[in-house]
Amino acid sequence: MPWQLARSWLWSAARAACARTPMASGPVMMTAPSLPTNDAPDLLTDFLRSQSPGREPVPPLWLDGSGLPDVPRRLLVHDHGMTATLEAFWGEQMRLSVLHTEEKGNLLRRHVLLSGAASGTPAELGLIEIHLDALPPGALFAVRQRRIPFGAILSACGVSFKSRPAGFLRLVANDDLARLLRVTPGSAIHGRATTLYAQTDARVLANAVELLSGHQPA
């Protein structure tokens, strides 16, 4: 398929341009406090407001990891990237769709949808604020091409990173969110607020809110 060829070419170009750093060690299971970072409510609230102009969104319920149902807990309560986690769970690559993008200075905010490349089923809605000045040239190049998920870009470029969840959440899908994720309005949506750090020097790579669709592989 054309998108797969384009992704393969971009991946190779990103790897060639990036300066190599050691890959991270295996993931460590962990728990996280229930309170999010200051950036998380901002990312989430801005998205919900953009989906329903003129209406104040219902705030999410923030939870401890232990308060999540089994499948969301396995997909969210860890310190590694979501792209690899979702691809392992779904058994297929994730395809990126950029829904909205806004760049201010060294910050790039995006609303993205990750879907199964083969199935087309939505897996996650990601609200991310990327620190462009923290990225090596190859990663920056790939980010601007808007074809590869951010976690996959970091891995392809050899950027060792970890994801530090600051809180977990549950919210009720309104009509707009339900349409994006292909779920019934009123469905419970689970997610996490997290910060991605470089392993080598602890620099912040991105802040994100990651919302699971609730779908599961057939």
Image (cartoon, rainbow, N blue to C red):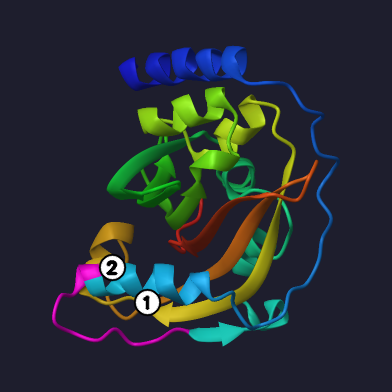
Is residue 59 within the magenta segment? Answer: yes
The image position of residue 140, as x and y in percent, is 49, 30
Residue ranking furthest to the left: 54
Q: Residue at x 61, y 63 (%)?
A: 194
**Type of residue at label 1?**
Ser
The image position of residue 215, as x and y in percent, is 45, 58
Residue ranking furthest to the front: 105
Task: Name the residue tied to disc 1.
Answer: 187
Are there few (<14), some (14-19), or many (20+) residues within 10 Å of tag 2? some
Q: Residue at x 46, y 18 (%)?
A: 10
Taking depth in this image into account, of 40 and 176 the one nearest to the observer is: 40
**Type of residue at label 2?**
Ala
The image position of residue 21, as x and y in percent, is 77, 27
Q: Are marks 2 and 1 in contact (CB under 8 Å)?
A: yes
Res 218 visible:
no
Taking depth in this image into account, of 9 and 91 the one nearest to the observer is: 9
Are there few (<14), some (14-19), or many (20+) residues within 10 Å of tag 1? some
Determine whether, in the image, residue 106 is placed left or right of residue 37.
Answer: left
Q: Residue at x 21, y 73 (%)?
A: 175
Is residue 199 within the magenta segment? Answer: no
Query: Which mark is on residue 178?
Result: 2
The image position of residue 52, as x and y in percent, is 18, 75
| Stretch of the chain drawn in magenta | 50-60
Quarter location, residue 201: top right
Taking depth in this image into account, of 217 and 54 the one nearest to the observer is: 54
Q: Is label 1 in a helix, a strand or a loop?
A: loop
In primary-sequence order, the first of circles 2 and 1 is: 2
